[in-house]
Image: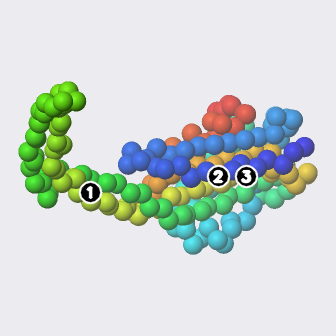
């Protein structure tokens, strides 16, 4: 069985900021053979970036998604073990604003010259005398949160499914509905459909 690896590529997130979801699984695994699931110990590193309330919402949403697929929660020795890892990264995006009127000097003159000589006739044009538009560049710092969820085959100690959700974090506390919605989208990428 191959080990599943997902490369996390942080895409430029625009102001509308849709979350990005990716998942990969081992196609040789029979997910119907698993009956129970358990939650591995919460990584202490997660507590640096996830509030206690968000932690509870995340774990309950994962539990709900797996139970909806027919798996039964079991505290120890479950068929599937769930590992959760959270990452928060500082990002910066830049925007340029062209101030068309600041420093505007108006059009210069246009000169057209016509000359006639022994070599023939010629026409010359002198260009516009404009100052280039000044640009103001704005930097916007924000945080990108990434949640990595691994499902491991307990007997073989191998990852059989990995899901990744990544998006721009707001300043407000995450809500239960918001986290439930993100987990619902992510777990749609699991090869086991809901039965409940």
Label 3 or label 1, whichever lies nearer to me, is 1
Per the image, label 3 sits on a secondary structure element best described as strand
Per the image, label 1 sits on a secondary structure element best described as strand
Q: Is residue 151 left or right of residue 165?
A: right
Question: Disc 2 designates what residue?
Answer: 8
- Residue 187 position within the rendered picture, expressed as x and y whole percent measured from the top left: 64, 41
The earlier-in-sequence mark between 1 and 2 is 2
Question: Disc 3 designates what residue?
Answer: 150
- Residue 99 position within the rendered picture, expressed as x and y whole percent measured from the top left: 19, 53
9 or 99: nearer the viewer: 99
* Badge count: 3
Q: Quadrant of the N terminus?
A: top right
Q: CA distance from mark 3 to mark 2?
A: 14 Å
Callout 1: 10 Å neighbours few (<14), some, many (20+)? few
Above or below, 175 relative to 65: below
- Residue 120 position within the rendered picture, expressed as x and y whole percent measured from the top left: 20, 27
Q: Quadrant of the C terminus?
A: top right
Question: Disc 1 designates what residue?
Answer: 135
Per the image, label 2 sits on a secondary structure element best described as loop
Q: Which residue is at 79% across, 47% downward?
A: 4
The earlier-in-sequence mark between 3 and 2 is 2
Callout 2: 10 Å neighbours few (<14), some, many (20+)? few
Q: CA distance from mark 1 to mark 2?
A: 34 Å
Residue 42: quarter of image? bottom right
């Amino acid at each position: 069985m191959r080990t599943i690896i997902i490369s996390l590529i942080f895409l430029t997130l625009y102001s509308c900021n849709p979350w990005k979801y990716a998942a990969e699984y081992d196609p040789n695994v029979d997910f119907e053979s698993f009956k129970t699931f358990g939650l591995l110990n919460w990584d202490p590193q997660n507590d640096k970036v996830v509030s206690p309330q968000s932690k509870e919402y995340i774990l309950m949403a994962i539990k709900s998604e797996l139970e909806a697929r027919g798996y039964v929660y079991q505290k120890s020795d479950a068929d599937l073990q769930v590992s959760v890892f959270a990452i928060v990264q500082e990002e910066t995006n830049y925007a340029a604003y062209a101030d068309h009127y600041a420093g505007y000097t108006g059009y210069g003159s246009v000169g057209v010259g016509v000359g006639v000589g022994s070599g023939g006739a010629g026409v010359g044009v002198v260009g516009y005398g404009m100052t280039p538009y000044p640009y103001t560049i704005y930097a916007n710092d924000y945080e990108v949160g990434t949640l990595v969820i691994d499902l491991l085959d307990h007997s073989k100690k191998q990852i059989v499914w990995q899901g990744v959700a990544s998006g721009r974090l707001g300043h407000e506390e995450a809500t239960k509905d918001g986290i439930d919605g993100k987990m619902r989208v992510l777990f749609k990428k699991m090869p086991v459909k809901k039965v409940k």
